[in-house]
Image (cartoon, rainbow, N blue to C red):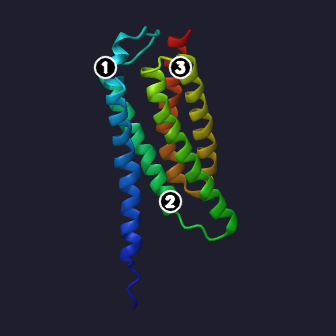
Amino acid sequence: MENTYNKQESMSGLAIFMLAAVVAPGLAAIISYFTGAYFGIGILPRPGYMMPDVAFYVLDIITRVIFGISLYFTARQIAESDGAKTLKTVAVTLWLVAYALSLIWIPVFFTLKSYMASFILLAAIVAITTAQFLINLKISVPAALMILPYWGFAIYCAYVNLMIAL
């Protein structure tokens, strides 16, 4: 019986997992720290319902980690047909765009204090993650389900952002 274990494939999977689930949330936390996000939210006008600051930060990191795991599940899915490869490429691209927009949102909201622009960024993130969820349903159901916590948190952040902007 032939051993089908491929060490190189296993290492690339670990690299994707580490990048998406550890490095990406860590980068967001570093940007948040240096733009004053961990210190500035307490002085903002608070909408009708705003969770405690500590819960907000913890939930932000947890949802980013889960969102990163969704990328891992998407990237590890084997795409055999050209259509499946295209869907996988689109899903990964949407993940990267949503993640980049979330990193851009942090300084726009906390440093520039441009609340309407940051709301528009969050609305774009919600739209992108919605499309990503629908595409991932065709690629990997676990990946699609891993998007939902981040999607819900983005909707909540958009609500808080809009209430602050108004």
Asked whether the residues under the numbered discs 2 and 3 touch, taking CB atoms below 8 Å apart as contact, a structural biologist would say no
Query: Where does residue 165 sit, x and y in percent of width and height?
Result: 54, 12
Residue type highlighted by circle 1: Phe
For label 3, count other residues whose C-alpha is less than 10 Å away and answer few (under 14), some (14-19) or many (20+): some
Mark 3 or mark 1: name the one nearer the start of the chain: 1
The image shows residue 80, relative to residue 161, as above or below, that is below
Residue type highlighted by circle 2: Ala
Q: Which residue is mark 1?
A: 39
Q: Secondary structure at mark 2?
A: helix
Is 97 positioned to the left or the right of 36 in the image?
A: right
Residue type highlighted by circle 3: Tyr
Nearer the observer: mark 1 or 2; the answer is 1
- Which residue is drawn at the image coordinates 66% and 60% (left, top)? 86
The image shows residue 105, relative to residue 97, as above or below, that is above
- Which residue is drawn at the image coordinates 64% and 43% (left, top)? 131
Mark 1 or mark 2: name the one nearer the start of the chain: 1
Query: Where does residue 47 sit, x and y in percent of width and height?
Result: 46, 10
Q: Secondary structure at mark 1?
A: helix
| Disc 3 to disc 1, C-alpha distance | 20 Å
On the image, which quarter does residue 122 sit in? Answer: top right
- Which residue is drawn at the image coordinates 63% and 50% (left, top)? 135
Circle number at residue 159: 3
Q: Which residue is mark 2?
A: 75
